Image (cartoon, rainbow, N blue to C red):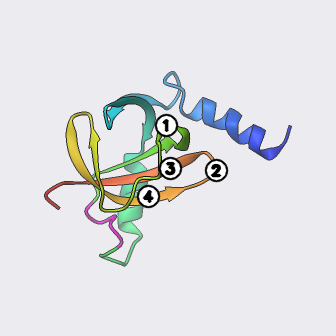
Amino acid sequence: MNFKDQLAIDAAVFFNPNEFGETHLIEGRQMVIVIDNHELTERKANTANPDDGIHDAEILFYAKRDDFPQRPDVDSWLVMDGKQYRVAVVQEDDVSYTIALRANGS
């Protein structure tokens, strides 16, 4: 088994609704994501840059890259569970995106 195979196995566990994953409606499609309020709090506490987008974020979640047709752009709109947000931060790794959202009034 190579590293990418192991990542795929780990992602299957991480995004499993019986483990960490939760089903949410994002851009009109049901996706299993992992919301991480603790990580959002940590990032807010550990950033010195008020312009990095994380200060105004109210949701941070992980999603499988394959669930999105393309990488979300910072400052683009994203509808989650019927509420419109601005994308504050997007990071990616081999299998997932880390996305932070802020309310559309921010």
Q: Residue at x 49, y 37 (%)?
A: 67
**Does the magenta segment cover residue 53?**
yes
Q: Where are the magenta residues, as a range? A: 52-56
Instruction: Residue 90: give its label.
Output: 4
| Disc on the earlier residue, 2 or 1 | 1
Provide the secondary structure element on which disc 3 rests: strand
CA separation in Å, label 4 and label 1: 15 Å
Residue 19, x across and y down, in percent = 53, 27
Q: Residue at x 61, y 30 (%)?
A: 13
Is 94 situated above or below 52? above
Q: Is residue 4 left or right of residue 98?
A: right
**Residue at the outermost front position:** 69
CB within 8 Å, label 4 to label 3: yes
Instruction: Residue 30: give its label.
Output: none
CA separation in Å, label 4 and label 3: 7 Å
CB within 8 Å, label 3 to label 2: no
Q: Residue at x 57, y 34 (%)?
A: 14
